[in-house]
Structures are given as structure tokens and as C-alpha cells.
Amino acid sequence: MKIIYTDYAEDTIKDRKFSKEIIEDALKNPDEIVKGKRNRKIAHKIIKNKLLRVVFEENENAKTYIVITAYYAGPKRYMKNENQF
């Protein structure tokens, strides 16, 4: 899958000092994927007891992920399967 970053995603990733490698790993190897708003999906990846949430859209025809934003959150708040951390 090709990964495209919106301008907003580029800004937030830079501001939050995330590497694109971490974002891409969360997309390619998520601990889980949940439904977001507006037909978006959210990839969850536990990193050092924090939950990385990557909000993205998937264009299956173009085989592309479009990253909207990414941020850390508390795992207990968002993980469906709390036994994963």
C-alpha cells in the first residue's frame, strides 16, 4: 500500500516529533484497527505503554492509505482488547 500524508498530518507529525517510520509501522502492523468517523479508520499500535493512534482513510482502488493525523493516547481508553497491553 502506498501511504500519503495530508498537509495537516505532515504538520502534526512534525510538531509531535513522530517519525514516518513509526506511523508506517502502525499502518502496516497495527495491534488493531477500529472504525473512526466519516468512513475513516484508526490504526492502534502500543509503543512503550502508550497507544499510538493513526487516523487514516483507505482508498482500496488506488491501494493507498491517506494519513489524516496521529497522536498518543492512553490504551485503556481506546483499545477494544485491553489484554493486549
Image (spheres, rainbow, N blue to C red):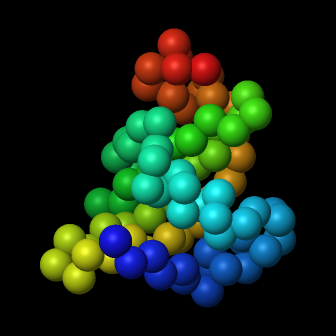
Q: Is residue 9 above or below residue 35?
A: below
Q: Is residue 23 left or right of residue 40?
A: right
Q: Nearer the viewer, residue 72 or 1?
A: 1
Q: Is residue 48 left or right of residue 37?
A: right
Residue 54 seen in render: no
Residue 47: quadrant of the picture: top right
Q: Residue at x 30, y 60 (%)?
A: 39
**Quarter of the rendering occupied by the N terminus:** bottom left
**Quarter of the rendering occupied by the C terminus:** top right
Q: Position of residue 84 (x, y in %)?
A: 52, 20
Residue 21 seen in render: yes
Q: Nearer the viewer, residue 40 or 21?
A: 21
Residue 80: quadrant of the picture: top left
**Residue that lies at the very extreme toward the left in this rendered image:** 61
Q: Residue at x 20, y 71 (%)?
A: 60
Q: Is residue 85 above or below residue 9?
A: above
Q: Is residue 54 above or below residue 68?
A: above
**Residue that lies at the very extreme toward the top in this rendered image:** 83
Q: Is residue 39 left or right of residue 76?
A: left
Q: Position of residue 40 (x, y in %)?
A: 36, 60
Q: Position of residue 28 (x, y in %)?
A: 43, 55
Q: Residue at x 46, y 57 (%)?
A: 27
Q: Is residue 65 left or right of residue 71?
A: left
- The number of numbered badges drawn on the structure is 0
Q: Position of residue 79 (x, y in %)?
A: 51, 28
